[in-house]
Image (spheres, grey):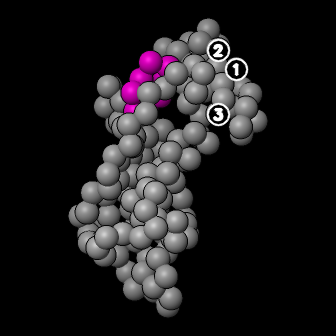
Amino acid sequence: MTEQLAKAPAVGDVLPAIEIPITLQRLVMEAGANRDFSLMHHDSAVAQSAGASAAFANTFFLMGMFERLVRNWAGSRIRFKKIGPLKMLNFNVVGDTLLFRGKVVAIDEVERGEKWLLNLWCESERGQTTTCMVEVIKE
């Protein structure tokens, strides 16, 4: 993680992508960390009964990865003002390799710094699976 950006961001800047494979072990560890023990997140038979092809990542995992994407790019000295809306368009399942990406869509001056509006999304081999808008404050 960087402590600050090398240059001031501009509208249209693309955040460096994060690639992460989804394994059953990762989902079980993540479920234990956030105490989301819903079976569909670690039992493929249950997930299939819900319409997924296999066990799938939960909201906390996706939001955590979006935060990691932003902090890897902007550093630790930002404050998240708003996360959302987050839209799940497709399941992120065991066996997928996910790419988390983002783009700066607006920069506004605020009382104590700048507010950056970021369009974030997640892709798998099947295309875009999740979208999320984020506002951060850089003082």
How many residues crowd mark 3 within 10 Å: few (<14), some (14–19), many (20+)?
A: some
Q: Classify mark 3: helix, strand or loop.
A: helix
In magenta, the rendered stretch is 90-98
> Residue 17: percent from the left, percent from the top?
33, 46
Say which residue label 3 marks.
30
The dominant secondary structure in magenta is: loop
> Residue 130: percent from the left, percent from the top?
43, 40
Residue found at the far bottom of this picture: 111
- Residue found at x 46% / y 67%: 3
- Residue found at x 40% / y 86%: 109
Is 64 displayed left or right of 108 in the figure?
A: right
Quadrant for residue 81, please give it: bottom right
Amino acid type, label 1: Leu
Q: Depth check: give the residue in front, 74 or 98.
A: 74
Labels 2 and 1 touching (C-beta < 8 A) = yes
| 16 vs 44: above or below | below
Is 37 displayed left or right of 113 in the figure?
A: right
Question: Mark 3 or mark 2, which is nearer the start of the sequence?
Answer: 3
> Residue 83: percent from the left, percent from the top?
54, 59
| 89 vs 17: above or below | above
* Picture disc at residue 39: 1
Single out the mark in the foreground, 3 or 1. Answer: 3
Amino acid type, label 2: Asp
Residue found at the far top of this picture: 45
Amino acid type, label 3: Glu
Say which residue label 2 marks.
43
Separation (CA) of disc 2 from disc 1: 5 Å
How many residues crowd mark 1 within 10 Å: few (<14), some (14–19), many (20+)?
A: some
Separation (CA) of disc 2 from disc 3: 14 Å
